[in-house]
Amino acid sequence: MNRTYTILVPILLILIIAIAEMATAIYTPSLPTVAAHFQISEALTQWTVSINLLGLALSGPIYGPWSDSAGRRTVLRAGMTLFLVGSIFSYLAGTIELLLLARFIQGLGAGVAVVVSFAVVRDLFDEKKSAKVLSFMGMAIALSPGLAPVLGSYIAHHMHWSMCFAVVSMTALGLVILLLTIMPETLSLHERVPLSLKSIGRAYVNVFKNVRFVVLALIPSLMIGSIWAWMAATPVLFIKYLGVPVQHYGYYGFSGVVFYVIGAFMNSKLLNRFDLNSLVMGGLVVCGGSACSLVIAGYSGLEDPMLLQLIEFPFAFGLAFIIPNGTALAFSQVKEGLGASSSLLGSLEMGLGAVGVLLIGTFFDGTITPIASIMLIATLLSWILYWVHRKK
């Protein structure tokens, strides 16, 4: 593959990941409005976020082996087309039941984004280069849900909340067209494996036998789960309980993403000086300090949204060292069955994201305390997994 494609393909993958991530978060500022519109509880409204992540998690195990057999391009086209269909139906949904179904379909399609994109990167680049590319993809993964509430806040204030899905649908249509016209195939014919239930089962058995991969994959997945808890709950906390105007909320979320981007930029520079393990450890230390501070703030009764967001900034910064480097470390343990490994990683990330949202929907009490507690627990579990990995 020529140099032009090694530049264009990552850009296209970043755009695909970005819209898949935006679709989950773009209408989070509208959650209080959606609850009032359908006359339902806040917990049920948050299900429209978690069911989308559940669709992402469930579809991942299919896309990986399928892409190992049919090729990355074919599967990306199919998944993004399904994502487009789910986005259109989300826009048209007139009841909460139809919205939940549409969001689930949207999530099933969006599952292709991270899973197959990770596999494409490993098709094209070695471990060190993969870490750098994944770092930029990590920016998209964090920046998109951060930008999405800014856009969603504007739409919710000036238009109807359902217009969020109209924007996603139009963007998805453009990406499907690009996949049909310029996306090359990155998996050669001799590297493909026959697709069957037996081969899929064997692939996943081999993945789970790779204990190092599973342990390392859980680290970024847990941290992603914790940040989804933050993103699902803070719109309700800030807007409903702390009095932030809906049109201003997006800027709070985006400010945290700025720190992730700063961290990702620093990470790309530090990769030339430090090994991946050291960078992951540094990120865990920073995230742990931030999560502890948020827990203390919660128990102290702090209710200033600006101060709470300020305390969260180091957590966002630390994630930029954990997610891409932890992912690259996990893939460095994979010698074969890359598609299945990508599927498991993607499913873990989105599945634990759904768990984070469900937990916050269950325990949210109108304060920062349950959100901070989930973030701290995820960080502590990641610490334990890191030390298990280092001792093996």
Image: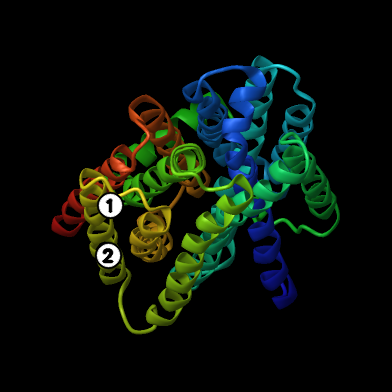
- Confirm whether residue 30 shows in the render: yes
Q: Which mark is residue 294?
A: 1
Percent across and percent down for residue 172 are 77, 46
Which three-letter amino acid code belongs to the residue tagged 1? Answer: Leu
Identify the image quadrant of residue 37. Answer: top right
Q: How crowded is mark 1: few (under 14 residues within 10 Å), some or many (20 or more)?
A: many
State the residue in front, 189 or 32. 32
Give the CA distance from mark 2 to mark 1. Answer: 13 Å
Q: Identify whether 155 is placed above or below 185.
A: above
* Circle 2: element type: helix
Marks 2 and 1, the one that precedes in the sequence: 2
Residue closest to the far left = 391
Q: Residue at the location (65% across, 15% down)?
A: 97
- Which amino acid lies under the numbered mark 2 shown in the image of this protein? Val
Q: Mark 2 points at which residue?
A: 286
Secondary structure of the residue carrying numbered label 1: helix
In the rendered image, residue 206, in percent from the top left (x then y), is placed at: 37, 39
Residue 7's x, y, as percent?
Answer: 68, 72
